Image (cartoon, helix red, strand yellow):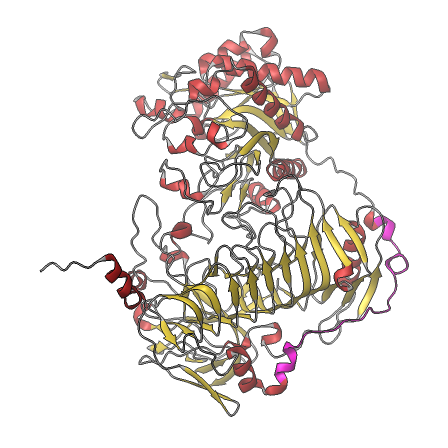
Amino acid sequence: MRIRLSFAALIALAPALVFAVQRPPVVRAASGKVEYVADANGDRVPDFSTAGYAGGGVALPLVPAAIVVAPAAGDATARIQAALDFVADRPADAQGFRGAVQLLPGRYELAGRLRIQASGVVLRGAGEKTVLVAAGTERGALIAARGVAKEDFGSARAVTDARVPVGATRLTLSDASGLGVGETVAITRPTTKEWSHELGMDVAPGRQQFAWKPAAMTLRWTRTIAAIEGNVVTLDAPLTTALEAKFGGGKLAAIKASGRLRHVGVENLRCESVYDAANPLDEQHAWEAVFFEHVEDGWVAEITAAHFAGTVFNVGAGCRRVTVQDCASVAPVSELGGYRRHTFHTSGEQTLFLRCRAEDGRNDFTVGYLTGGPNVFLECRAERSTGFSGSVGSWASGLLFDNVTLDGGTLELNNRETWNQGVGWAAANSMLWQCSAPVVICRQPPTAQNWADGVWGQFVGDGYWSEVNEFIKPESLYRAQLAARSGTAALDALLPRRHTIDNAPHIEGAVTDLAARIAPKPRAPGKPLALANGVLTVGGARLSGREEDISWWRGYLYAGAEPTKPAITRFAPGMHGAFLTDDLDQLTDAMVAQKQVVLRHHYGLWYERRRMDHERMRRPDGDVWPPFFEQPFARSGQGRAWDGLSRYDLTKYNAWYFARLREFAALARQKGLVLVNEMYFQHNIIEAGAHWVDSPWRPTNNVNGTRFTEPPPFDGDTVKMAAEFYDLSDPAYRALHRAYIRQCLANLADEPNVIHTLSAENSGPLSFMQFWLDVVAEWEAETGRHPLIALSACKDVQDAILAEAKRAAVVDVIDLTYWFRTAKGDEFAPHGGTDLAPRQHLRLWKSGRPSAASIAAMAAEYRTKFPGKAILTGLPEAGDVQP
């Protein structure tokens, strides 16, 4: 039987379709006690009151000043950093504090960034009159306290309970011997294939790999043992996802986290970022005001931040028991897109955001991937919000929004499905309590629950709804739970603080070696790259070792999701790590350890990860997905590119992109490594049509009127833009390339450990190579500088250039990467300019790969012909970059 309903009838039925009827409250408070109603599995609303400094209910300390800094003309970075380091060198008192740096009222221009590098150090201002100004174009946090992820684990002990319910603090172990009260432990639960299937997270549409990756998604809680009875352990804070034997159960292991910073704070000041006033969407400035990572028992309080672009107040990975209190973000400046204006965020555990305010943000109150909670947003407000608040990562559990008000946007405990590379179920066992938002979404995940009690707005979802559009008791769940656990006196810890300016020695008198501390450090020569008699050397020794390639389109926001390589200019806002925003010092250390001596760099295939689907359509909005593969050009703030952000300006350059190359090159000089700087990436203009659609050179993506065919001449799934890209007959277009090549040269002019090449995957025509070398020669003649230049091309182009005495003189290095001979003497040597990529040529080749011996013979041939030039190769069979 077919039933037909009118549109009006469907609308009338909609509320019944999207959420269940209201149900009785699951939390009640009376006579100073909080009573919980558990479900049939024993799951109940967790006690969120352990969120915050020292586990909740402990007032933020007012640490005495140890040193005073007054404003002075010029860059204040070195003076304030010297004061922080001075305090870091002091012994800690019985409570773990070394002292505070007191900044007096005034403006402090900071060309660099400030780092708290020891436990027990506090940075304090004198209120709104103390203004720290983030100058320059660096994106990193203005103030950062970053510990180290150094943890030593004891033996893992199995949890033997068939099921440890949500909200529980007691669990039975196979053996609790050797554990002690007060010891820090990690409780883990695997994401098994069976659980992923139960949640519906094991399948996803399309070619994207958006299903969950169980091996990379272990849930973890860091807790302290409160009591031990036999093999039963009581924890200081509840578990926020059930441990179920049928889904892999759980394990407990003691940990010693020696790398964490403890008892650090930033308080009572104003932070501002400079920006380009002519571009209201400017992003060439600071993205974060305060960033904590691997911090325990820390706080950020009474901070106003203006004009920052990204995660303004960021409690990062490895943080535990941190309070962010009475902070505000105002007048942000950025694109209106994904992972911008991500105002207050935590990827840690037991974080409390109290009375925080955001203006004109996008995702104002958020938590990250697999956060174990409890994490709390209490009495926070967002004005003119344009996005959602909630979890931006998979399976954040134990999240409480308590008296949170959004003026715009949505408040969500949601299944975000394929969003941001398959987040799926974003929140579980979380509560919306007495909150208000234009749209409130509360959905129930399989095997878990989400609750909404006393909420106001438009309601969507099948979660557990109670007392909607009502003022409920207790007014605050967090406050009621805290009072029930620790007594009403503990509520005083939530009161606003009042500050006075301490008397302490001024930096000029206290730091006797101040002049030496703030003086510019001389540049160490390191191990410079040099060319002598056709051989490349670093620090006087022959360059020898393997080559490292980069990732130019892969990346997830959690470890282990997929194999990936390093990338100098990959950017994950507010996130640092080998698959996110690479720590270049760690990257270069790893290269040295692995005997990798050369890294080839080029810009990414596309800017953001939505294009991983290889679709060619215009994106409906700027909700771009990180990590981002930064392009060398700056956004203009004008118009709308194919990815939904503003168009590029090919005459203005991405300052962060080029600064990262300089940073890597400087580290390469120190450590005896080499950066091969490939100025172009031919992959963008050949093969799949999706490779081209977001390119800055495409006319719809820039404000410079480049003259490529629009719409692009797609041929099925492919596009061939190489002929148009390499055609320099238009003077204006030619000038754009000339300026860009000169920018690449000038950017790295002071670093010797760099070899410049034209392009990655180069199979372009002779004419473009000639143009490139002519621009290089022109720049060298003008500047008197002579960087190392490599000829990396198809064999016919390579040989033609080497036959021209004038252009051959510009070449220092012959790169044997895009042609080869096999051991049998068969020669793979496609012609340049045939509109096929190297790998497309290889698909047509049936005669095998080269050997180390055949590559060595190629190198010997070219050394004989051109004895003053070095021979380099990226062919993996060579075994050495200088065969």
User: Count the marks: how many?
Assistant: 0
Seen at 64% across and 35% down, the residue is 665
Name the spot of residue 452 as percent of width and height, x first: 41, 73
What span is colored magenta in the figure?
490-516
Q: Residue furthest right?
A: 509
Q: Is residue 805 left or right of residue 461?
A: right
Against 48, residue 106 (above or below) is above
Residue toward you, 195 or 674: 195
Is the residue 801 above or below the residue 625 in the image?
above
Looking at the image, residue 253 sits to the left or right of residue 616; the answer is right
Residue 196 falls in image quadrant = bottom left
395 relative position to 290: left or right: left
The residue at the point 61 percent across, 27 percent down is 744
Note whether residue 748 is visible.
Answer: no
Camera sees residue 661? yes
Instruction: Let me know if residue 877 is in the magenta part.
Output: no
| Residue located at (46% from left, 53% from top) | 559
- Seen as rendered, the residue at the extreme left is 1
Above or below 40: residue 808:
above
Q: Please state the horizontal and vertical placement of residue 787, each as a whole percent of the image.
A: 65, 23
Asked if the stretch drawn in magenta spans residue 515, the answer is yes
Q: Return the x and y of residue 773 as percentages of the image width and height.
A: 58, 16
Q: Quadrant of the N terminus?
A: bottom left
